[in-house]
Image (cartoon, grey):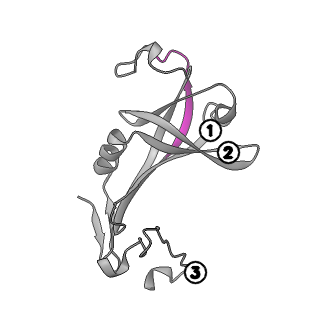
Amino acid sequence: MGTKDPHRDVEYLGRSECWSLLERAKVGRLAVILDGTPVIFPVNHLTEWDAVMVRCDPGGKLAGLYEGAPVSYEIDELDPDGRGGWSVQAKGRAHPVHDPWDRAGTPEPGADRRPRWVRIAVSDVTGRRLRRSPEESWVDATGDIVVEAKLGPDWADG
């Protein structure tokens, strides 16, 4: 159980709950820097102790995953009723793995065509859970998700 913010419907998740959500998630978003620009890729992952492991094709995102590159990995889920959800962000450094089959928990070599593994050594993991009342739902009458942008230092005060 995390820490509840008394001024908002936000619960800040503890480290163990963040890792539990990472372990259960199937897909996340990997943020890397390519040619000086942040780029985000959807990727499959698995977790290993204090790391997130991703597989990818040579080229593309792999160019931004050199040894020690700063990266961020994010997973989230929105409740079907549009009134709640959660997100977890893991920050760390990329470390290409040269012998990915020499580890417990790794899928068999034929299980995926993507030949390269990158280990994200996580240095910081944070998460939060949001819950709104029915009057504050994120889903409008047509079923579309509505997210209000609130700008400035007092955005949480409404």
Looking at the rendering, the stretch of residues picked out in magenta corresponds to 91-101
Q: Is residue 129 visible?
A: no
Query: Which of labels 1 and 3 is toward the front?
Result: 3
What's the amino acid at mark 3?
Answer: Gly
The Cα atoms of the two marked residues, 1 and 3, are separated by 31 Å
Tell me the SS state at disc 2. strand
Q: Residue at x 49, y 71 (%)?
A: 147
Q: Is residue 81 left or right of residue 101?
A: left
Magenta stretch mostly in which secondary structure?
A: strand
Mark 3, residue position: 152
Q: Is residue 128 above or below residue 56?
A: below
Residue 143 in percent (x, y) is at 42, 68
- Name the mark on residue 77: none
Q: Residue at x 45, y 80 (%)?
A: 156
Residue 83 in percent (x, y) is at 34, 69
Tell me the SS state at disc 3. loop
What's the amino acid at mark 2?
Answer: Ile
Q: Residue at x 35, y 33 (%)?
A: 49
What's the amino acid at mark 1?
Answer: Ala
Label 1 or label 3, whichever comes before in sequence order: 1
Residue situated in front as seen by the camera: 157 or 59: 59
The Cα atoms of the two marked residues, 3 and 2, are separated by 27 Å
Residue 31 in percent (x, y) is at 59, 46
Residue 67 in percent (x, y) is at 62, 30
Mark 1, residue position: 69
Q: Is residue 87 left or right of residue 31?
A: left
Outermost residue toward the left in this view:
1
Q: Given contact means CB atoms under 8 Å apart, are the residues at marks 2 and 1 in contact?
A: yes
Q: Is residue 54 above or below residue 112?
A: below
Mark 2, residue position: 33
Viewport quadrant of the N terminus: bottom left
Quarter of the view holding residue 69: top right
